[in-house]
Image (spheres, helix red, strand yellow):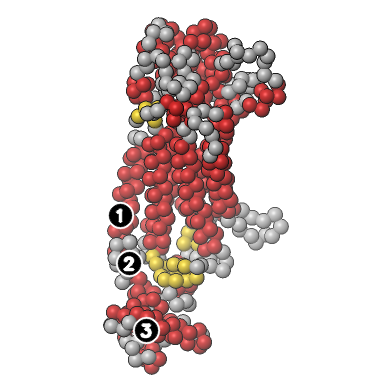
Amino acid sequence: MKLWGGRFSQPPSEVFERFSGSLAFDRRLLEADIRGSQAYARALAQVGIYTPEECQRVVEALERILEASRAPGFFDGATDEDVHTFVIRKLKEATGELAEKIHTGRSRNEQVSLDMRLWLRAEIDRDLELLALLMRALIGLARRYPNALIPGYTHLRRAQAVLWPHYLLAYFEMFWRDAERLQQARKRVNVCPLGSGALAGSAFAFDREAMARELGFEAISANSMDAAGDRDFVLDYLYAASMILLHLSRLAEDWIVYSTDEFGWLELSDSVTSGSSLMPQKKNPDALELIRGKTGRVWGALCSLFVTLKGLPTTYNRDLQEDKLPMFEAADELAACLEMARVVVETTELRPERARIALEESWVVATDLAEALARRGMPFHRAHQLVGKLVLESLRRGKKPSDWTPEELAAFSPEFTAECAILLHPDEGMRMRAVPGGTAPEAVRQALENAERRLESLLQSVASP
């Protein structure tokens, strides 16, 4: 059945029907469509379109349709234009003419927006839970190696020594901001458009606030024209998803590199890697590479919808049918990547001794030496130059920092005192970085405890959104 047609003297062509149909993908909105229609049926009863008994029949029939939809093959043979006409056809089969009243005062424009908001709200709640579980896994991995020291990098060159938990907390903070973005997106999603009609608002005296409360919305849309064409809430979600994938991709890149033979201080589990069809020795980081690769698909979804929306005139246009595929694809990829990343984190092992070798054979202590000289009154620029000359001489002579004795150091330059000799060991300089947010053990301990408190708060909010 169609929800329109009286004004037309000819039916749509078969090509147009194939071209414009959306049931193949918007069927995912079935439950949201039914929940919205049940709430709308109750609103129709409030304004006298349905009697209480008729309303009950419609609500119960919709519930039976939802239950039947869980069986395999439910959509087999369906040729309906979209999920909305599919539901109404099923409703008519169950209730007869009562189904023809369900669209009184309601437009598909507001119905589509409502369905997407209901679906996306649930999806965001799932994403927040998956993100929180990933963050918990990061904290767990930090707790497994609380005192391990690793090189921190800039330009992918060894830069300064940091505690392993400090490194993992950097990603915790990225994901925390992502959780905030998801929560902000959810707030914009959680606005009820019912009662907006096609664009001018409804002519029936619906209690819009009551409909919103029944469906769990925090607010109602303020302008019917805006509500008809608003997809900002989808863009907000796609941007939040894109940022999460950006951070997942950076983590993936780090761990792909750190688990190579050349670095060798991370060991990925066999359960998240694969082998080569030709080379027997290979252990490839496929899970991380796929996360890195799928990032482009989520970013593409954001770009796709941006381009769709950029030139649309006010209120609804059929272009907006193209809003669902990017939303669905991004949501699917995001959830899969978050779940996969959690498993990778839970099963990855650190090789502290390999990380220690990387520290000992490099000059990650150079900044510590320069700052020690500065604390004794030497201008930092001069201290920087002096330590740079020490590094250059060491490279010429093939000496590691620990190869220098206090006497040799003083012979190189009398400004190098016994304190400087102690700082040739990376643990010592690391302990001095005790400002909040730094990598000293006490600062990291406090940061871990703070992260755990915030995570507990997030998990509680996810449990009761």
**Label 2 CA crowd tier, 10 Å (few <14, some 14–19, many 20+):** many
Q: CA distance from mark 2 to mark 1?
A: 14 Å
Q: Nearer the viewer, residue 140 or 163?
A: 163
Q: Which circle's residue, 1 or 3, is located before the other in the chain?
A: 3
Q: Amino acid at mark 1?
A: Glu
Q: Amino acid at mark 3?
A: Arg
Which residue in the structure is indicated by mark 3?
Answer: 382
- Residue 189, image x and y in percent? 42, 34
Q: Quadrant of the N terminus?
A: top right
Q: Is residue 308 left or right of residue 165?
A: right
Quadrant location of residue 363?
Answer: bottom left
Q: Nearer the viewer, residue 405 or 245?
A: 245
Picture disc at residue 440: 2
Element carrying mark 2: loop
Task: Name the residue: 36% across, 21% down.
Answer: 208
Picture disc at residue 449: 1
Task: Name the residue: 60% across, 57% down.
Answer: 284
Q: CA distance from mark 1 to mark 3?
A: 39 Å
